[in-house]
Amino acid sequence: MLRRRFGKMAVTTVAGAMLMAAAACGGSGGDEGTTANSASGASEAPKASGLKVGLAFDVGGRGDKSFNDSAYAGLERAKTDLGAEIKDLSPAADGSNRGELLRQLAEAGYNPIIGVGFAYGEDIKKTAAEYPDIQFAVVDSASNGPNVTGLLFAEEQGSYLAGVAAADKSKTGHLGFVGGVENDLIKKFQAGFEAGAKSVKSDIKIDVKYLTPDGDFSGFKAPDKGKIAAEKMYQDGADIVYHASGDSGLGVFQAAAAAGKQAIGVDSDQYETVKEADLKKVIMTSMIKRVDVGVFEFIKAFKDGTAKGGSDNVYDLKVDGVGLSTSGGFIDDITAKVDEAKKKIVDGSVTVPAKP
Amino acid sequence: MTTSVAAPEARRVRRYHLALLGVALLILLLSLARVVADAPELTSSGTFGAALLLAVPIALAGLGGLWSERAGVVNIGLEGMMVLGTWCAGWAGYQWGAAAALVAGLLGGALGGLIHAVATVTFGVDHIISGVAINLLGPGITRFLSEVLYAQGTAAADKGAGITSSPGLASQAPSVSLPLLSDGPDLLGKLEATHWFLLSDVAGVLRGLTHDVNVLVILAVALIPLTFFILWRTTFGLRLRSCGENPWAAESLGVNVYLTKYIATIISGALAGLGGVFLVFVTTKYVEGQTAGRGFIGLAAMIFGNWRPGGLAVGASLFGYADGLQLRSSHAVTGLLLFGAILLLIYTGAQVRKALAVNGPGVRQYTAAAVAALAAVILLWLWVTVDKLPNEFVFITPHVLTLLVLSAASQSLRMPKADGVRYRRGEQH
């Protein structure tokens, strides 16, 4: 009898303890980043400016060598140039606690608060309604509240240049595009790329493959699937594949290296961020999104009192919010053509479609 | 006496031959569909290579599930153990190379198995709760470790690590090909390129399965018959399965049920971890979230495979094949419709023949035949009219196909009788 009762108690205790441990660990994803970063940021005496900037990362968090790190670079610049006190938080691996992070920052008195990534759209809307006195900004999503600023990038324009460069460089007249998740944001990349390539060669063939459907974000983290999809394109005769698929792009580069062909990176200058020497040389160029510029400009505007919310700031080719990287020197010989295409977009004689 | 021994023996031989015949028939039909639908991807070596790549982690997770469930421990924590495997493999791999990654991944997964065993066997925690906890624990712990060990400014970060990924492996796991046939002169590849009916298809399948194959794939494939042999042909296996069927009877015969369950669950975790190692080998580094639910798919393949190694291998291959196909070519997926229609027509024919052969045809047979015929017509109609499938359908092909085939094939599932039952020594019920 006693034994049985003990057994039951043990069951409940252990089960409870495990779940709590698990919950603690799950949560620590965010907390860890907080403590580590606040050591450098918050613990210093607040600078004279009194500007307290909070930033919540997209899934992947700081150190992704791409999107999030770019946003952080903007935040860091705000710290050095504007004397802002900064704090950044990373969400759990599945991104379920985005709203929580925003509220944490709001409760701690941070203003403005920036959410990085289109997935913050809904959470920002809710949080912004709860804290009407705080200014919010969201990267890659349009403004959806009177105190929310949307920081948008003209990915289609940058991708257009990538398409121009790829079509100029292609020997087979056959290109490929690998998208991570089939949503409107990634479709902008596809649309621009196709338009750019066709502006050079109207009959160019472009294979398109998305790795996962809308809503299933594992497509940004599946290098094996990226590799399989790109492999097929290279086998069919494509010689340059452009990817907009986050971490899955690694697989695209691997397929390019195995096939002896080339690929185009995305978001940051991937020639610089990829460490493997054999993958480096297949990265012809990268379509860069200057998230750092967007974040910094927003903070600066807030400090100057011009960030009122309720509108979108679009970073396009005109302000160099997007563009092509030239490291590696693979596209040095066609710089003139790329610049010409850029000029046409900037002066308005070419309009790039945002939908394929 | 002699007849009773001979009968099962004969049946086994028949079954084995039937399986071979079935595979041959499938390839024949596939090549027919390939020619008619003009979808070379259906039997190309690229598709089968991709299928192998995608099937192996699922099969390893399924094998892990098989080991523990045969010993009576339900293991839905496979996903978490797999995550532990990927992280450990990435961490050890970037420092000491592929062999270390393999060992570390196995140990990481085994650690997850050990936790599950302590909770369920020693403390009698509900198996589902413990499994769910491990699924939360795996990603949580690995994220924590990544933040500590791969943070900015560490040596690992200089080598390319980030919070969501490890640096690349220091050395790659070797890949092998069949000499002459699928490498060098590449005879199979040449045969495949001719696009002859049947011959090229067989060549494509064989080349896909033998060209540039990672050594871990060979190990994984070998583990399936090995598991069958250990669990069904050795004393240890008999004892292990007896723990899953009736632990009290096993106990009365002197089997150490606790120990057996521990061993089974730890092996289960190690196998799931091995699946994780394979994912790391493919991408050459750890990427957070790269398991993408494969542990659960493996578990499902194992259940629909009726808790048998052969069944789970079929399930995993089917999923891998369909996934590889949809990733490589959406056009070929429409070819799959035609293939399905042909299969259903054959099934209809078989049902009708059966109905005519037995005295007084059963209503059941007629219904089955009618449903199959109708489905075949619908599939044919779809194939003729649909030029390009919407992407939404293409994406779910692997799931739908696996579900349909396995649920049709496994009408009578039988799980180990004491699977998921809490066992206490000496507590005869």
Image (cartoon, rainbow, N blue to C red):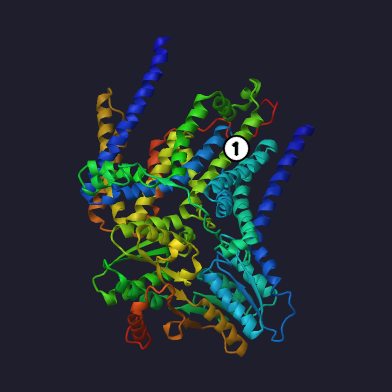
| Residue highlighted by disc 1 | B265
Q: Which residue is at a point 24% across and 27% down the rendered structure image?
A: B356
Q: Quadrant of residue B106?
A: top right
Camera-side residue of A10 and B20: B20
Q: In which chain is the residue bearing label 1?
A: B
* Position above or below: B282 against A197: above
* Position above or below: A303 against B122: below
Q: Which residue is at a point 70% across and 67% down the rendered structure image?
A: A35
Residue B172 rendering spot, x and y as whole percentages: 48, 51
Q: Tell me if A313 is positioned left or right of B17 in this view.
A: right
Question: Does the rendering let one see residue B341?
Answer: no
Q: Quadrant of residue A24?
A: bottom right
Q: Tell me if A345 is positioned left or right of A248 in this view.
A: left
Camera-side residue of B130 and B211: B211
Amino acid bearing label 1: Thr
Q: Quadrant of residue A346?
A: bottom left
Q: Quadrant of the C terminus of chain A?
A: bottom left
* Position above or below: B68 against B15: below
Residue A210 rendering spot, x and y as whole percentages: 39, 61
